[in-house]
């Protein structure tokens, strides 16, 4: 398989990742609304710790560190998105 073909595979995977990440952010928006109405904070440190542990368990050992790093970034992005949405509702 050529480098160009391999890169095309990566591009296809990236498109799918973007679709899935946008879907995850849509769910995060609904979670933000629930947290806002329930008066809960955005950060649930225990939940994030559990999530990262579960992610590691799903990974092959040789990919676990890198994938955990990706999920840490995803969780941070979700928190930031939820915070912005909750602030918009409070300010608006």
Image (cartoon, rainbow, N blue to C red):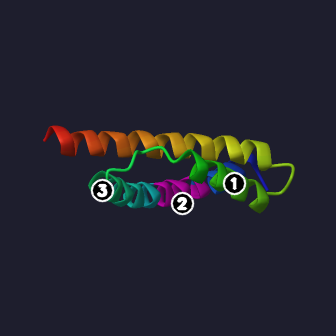
Q: Quadrant of the C terminus?
A: top left
Res. 5 mark? 1
Going 78% across and 49% down the picture, which residue do you hit? 64
Q: Do the residues bearing badges 2 and 1 touch, measured as CB atoms within 8 Å? A: no
**Circle 2 SS class:** helix
Q: Nearer the viewer, residue 33 or 76?
A: 33
Q: Do the residues bearing badges 2 and 3 touch, measured as CB atoms within 8 Å? A: no
Res. 33 mark? 3
Q: Nearer the viewer, residue 23 or 42?
A: 42
Mark with earlier residue (2, 1): 1
The number of discs equals: 3
Res. 30 mark? none
Q: Position of residue 10 (x, y in %)?
A: 64, 52
Magenta extent? 12-21
Going 31% across and 39% down the picture, which residue do you hit? 84
Mark with earlier residue (2, 3): 2
Going 49% across and 55% down the picture, which residue do you hit? 21
In the image, residue 3 above or below residue 38:
above
**Label 2, on which residue?**
16
Query: Which mark lies nearer to you, 3 or 1?
Result: 3
């Amino acid at each position: 398989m050529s480098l160009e073909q391999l890169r095309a595979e990566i591009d296809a995977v990236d498109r799918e990742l973007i679709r899935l990440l946008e879907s995850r952010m849509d769910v995060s928006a609904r979670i933000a609304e629930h947290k806002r109405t329930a008066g809960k904070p955005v950060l649930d440190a225990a939940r994030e710790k559990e999530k990262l542990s579960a992610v590691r368990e799903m990974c092959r050992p040789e990919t676990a560190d890198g994938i955990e790093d990706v999920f840490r970034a995803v969780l941070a992005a979700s928190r930031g998105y939820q915070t912005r949405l909750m602030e918009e509702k409070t300010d608006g």
